[in-house]
Image (tube, grey):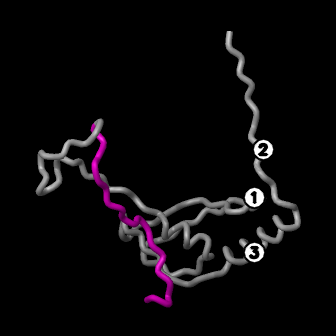
Protein backbone atom coordinates (compact mmCIF):
# COMPACT_ATOMS: atom_id res chain seq x y z
CA UNK A 1 0.00 0.00 0.00
CA UNK A 2 1.22 3.47 -0.83
CA UNK A 3 -0.12 6.68 0.67
CA UNK A 4 0.83 10.13 -0.64
CA UNK A 5 -0.19 13.36 0.97
CA UNK A 6 -0.70 16.21 -1.47
CA UNK A 7 -0.46 19.80 -0.29
CA UNK A 8 -0.32 23.10 -2.08
CA UNK A 9 2.86 25.09 -2.00
CA UNK A 10 2.71 28.28 -0.04
CA UNK A 11 4.66 30.93 -1.89
CA UNK A 12 6.38 33.90 -0.42
CA UNK A 13 3.92 36.71 0.04
CA UNK A 14 4.89 40.33 0.06
CA UNK A 15 3.25 42.72 2.52
CA UNK A 16 -0.16 44.05 1.44
CA UNK A 17 1.00 47.67 1.22
CA UNK A 18 3.88 46.92 -1.12
CA UNK A 19 1.70 44.53 -3.17
CA UNK A 20 -0.94 47.19 -3.82
CA UNK A 21 1.73 49.78 -4.63
CA UNK A 22 3.46 47.44 -7.11
CA UNK A 23 0.13 46.43 -8.66
CA UNK A 24 -0.85 50.08 -9.10
CA UNK A 25 2.52 50.84 -10.72
CA UNK A 26 2.15 47.86 -13.10
CA UNK A 27 -1.38 48.94 -14.05
CA UNK A 28 -0.27 52.47 -14.93
CA UNK A 29 2.54 51.10 -17.12
CA UNK A 30 0.21 48.54 -18.68
CA UNK A 31 -2.61 50.98 -19.47
CA UNK A 32 -0.60 53.63 -21.36
CA UNK A 33 -2.23 53.89 -24.78
CA UNK A 34 -0.13 53.77 -27.93
CA UNK A 35 -1.43 54.38 -31.45
CA UNK A 36 -0.18 52.18 -34.26
CA UNK A 37 -0.90 49.71 -37.03
CA UNK A 38 -1.67 46.02 -36.47
CA UNK A 39 -0.14 43.57 -38.93
CA UNK A 40 -1.23 39.92 -39.11
CA UNK A 41 1.69 38.16 -40.81
CA UNK A 42 0.06 34.70 -41.02
CA UNK A 43 -3.10 35.85 -42.83
CA UNK A 44 -2.82 39.22 -44.51
CA UNK A 45 -6.27 40.71 -44.86
CA UNK A 46 -7.64 38.55 -42.03
CA UNK A 47 -8.39 39.22 -38.39
CA UNK A 48 -6.93 38.03 -35.10
CA UNK A 49 -9.13 37.27 -32.06
CA UNK A 50 -7.76 36.76 -28.57
CA UNK A 51 -8.90 37.12 -24.97
CA UNK A 52 -6.83 38.66 -22.21
CA UNK A 53 -7.10 39.24 -18.47
CA UNK A 54 -3.89 40.68 -17.10
CA UNK A 55 -4.69 41.49 -13.49
CA UNK A 56 -6.71 39.48 -10.96
CA UNK A 57 -10.28 40.65 -10.49
CA UNK A 58 -10.38 42.27 -13.93
CA UNK A 59 -13.00 41.16 -16.45
CA UNK A 60 -11.77 39.21 -19.46
CA UNK A 61 -11.50 41.38 -22.57
CA UNK A 62 -11.88 39.91 -26.06
CA UNK A 63 -9.98 41.72 -28.82
CA UNK A 64 -10.53 41.46 -32.57
CA UNK A 65 -7.82 43.13 -34.62
CA UNK A 66 -7.90 43.33 -38.43
CA UNK A 67 -4.78 43.33 -40.60
CA UNK A 68 -3.76 46.91 -41.48
CA UNK A 69 -6.03 48.47 -38.85
CA UNK A 70 -4.78 51.60 -37.12
CA UNK A 71 -5.88 51.61 -33.49
CA UNK A 72 -4.89 52.54 -29.93
CA UNK A 73 -3.94 49.68 -27.63
CA UNK A 74 -2.52 49.52 -24.09
CA UNK A 75 1.24 48.89 -23.84
CA UNK A 76 0.66 45.60 -21.98
CA UNK A 77 -1.33 44.19 -24.91
CA UNK A 78 1.25 45.48 -27.40
CA UNK A 79 4.00 43.61 -25.54
CA UNK A 80 1.94 40.40 -25.68
CA UNK A 81 1.27 40.82 -29.41
CA UNK A 82 4.88 41.55 -30.34
CA UNK A 83 6.06 38.45 -28.45
CA UNK A 84 3.76 36.10 -30.36
CA UNK A 85 6.11 33.88 -32.34
CA UNK A 86 6.14 30.49 -34.02
CA UNK A 87 8.95 28.02 -34.52
CA UNK A 88 9.65 26.62 -37.98
CA UNK A 89 11.53 23.39 -37.55
CA UNK A 90 13.96 21.92 -40.06
CA UNK A 91 15.01 18.28 -39.89
CA UNK A 92 18.76 17.64 -40.03
CA UNK A 93 18.45 15.47 -43.14
CA UNK A 94 17.03 18.34 -45.21
CA UNK A 95 19.71 20.93 -44.47
CA UNK A 96 21.53 21.93 -47.68
CA UNK A 97 25.27 21.21 -47.41
CA UNK A 98 24.97 18.67 -44.58
CA UNK A 99 22.29 16.64 -46.35
CA UNK A 100 22.44 13.07 -45.11
CA UNK A 101 25.40 13.66 -42.78
CA UNK A 102 23.46 14.81 -39.74
CA UNK A 103 20.88 12.58 -38.08
CA UNK A 104 18.74 14.14 -35.35
CA UNK A 105 18.50 12.38 -32.00
CA UNK A 106 15.25 10.45 -31.52
CA UNK A 107 13.72 12.01 -34.62
CA UNK A 108 13.79 15.52 -33.20
CA UNK A 109 14.46 18.49 -35.49
CA UNK A 110 18.02 19.70 -35.18
CA UNK A 111 17.39 23.41 -35.84
CA UNK A 112 14.54 25.85 -36.01
CA UNK A 113 13.94 29.45 -36.99
CA UNK A 114 11.62 31.85 -35.20
CA UNK A 115 9.10 34.01 -37.08
CA UNK A 116 6.71 36.62 -35.78
CA UNK A 117 2.99 35.84 -36.24
CA UNK A 118 1.57 39.28 -35.47
CA UNK A 119 3.05 42.75 -35.07
CA UNK A 120 1.95 46.07 -33.70
CA UNK A 121 3.93 48.87 -35.28
CA UNK A 122 3.71 52.20 -33.38
CA UNK A 123 2.97 55.39 -35.34
CA UNK A 124 6.35 56.74 -34.20
CA UNK A 125 8.05 54.18 -36.45
CA UNK A 126 5.66 54.50 -39.42
CA separation, marks 2 and 1? Answer: 18 Å
CA separation, marks 3 and 2? Answer: 25 Å
- Residue 44 lies left or right of residue 120; in this view the side is left
CA separation, marks 3 and 1? Answer: 15 Å
Of labels 3 and 2, earlier in sequence is 2
Q: Which percent across, then down, holds residue 93? A: 17, 46
Q: Disc 2 vs disc 1: which is toward the camera?
A: 2
Q: Is residue 50 above or below residue 76?
A: above
Label 1: state its secondary structure.
loop
Determine if the magenta segment contains residue 75.
no
Of labels 2 and 1, earlier in sequence is 2
The residue carrying pointer 1 sits among few (fewer than 14), some (14 to 19) or many (20 or more) residues within 10 Å by Cα, namely few
- Residue 112 lies left or right of residue 67; in this view the side is left
Q: Is residue 92 above or below residue 87?
A: above
Task: Find the magenta span and give its range.
Answer: 107-126
Q: Are circles 3 and 2 on residues that touch, CB within 8 Å?
A: no
Residue for badge 3: 25
Amino acid sequence: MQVKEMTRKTGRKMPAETYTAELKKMRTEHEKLKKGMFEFVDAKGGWFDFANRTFPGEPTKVFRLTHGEICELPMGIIKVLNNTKRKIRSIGLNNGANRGNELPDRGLPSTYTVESRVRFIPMDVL
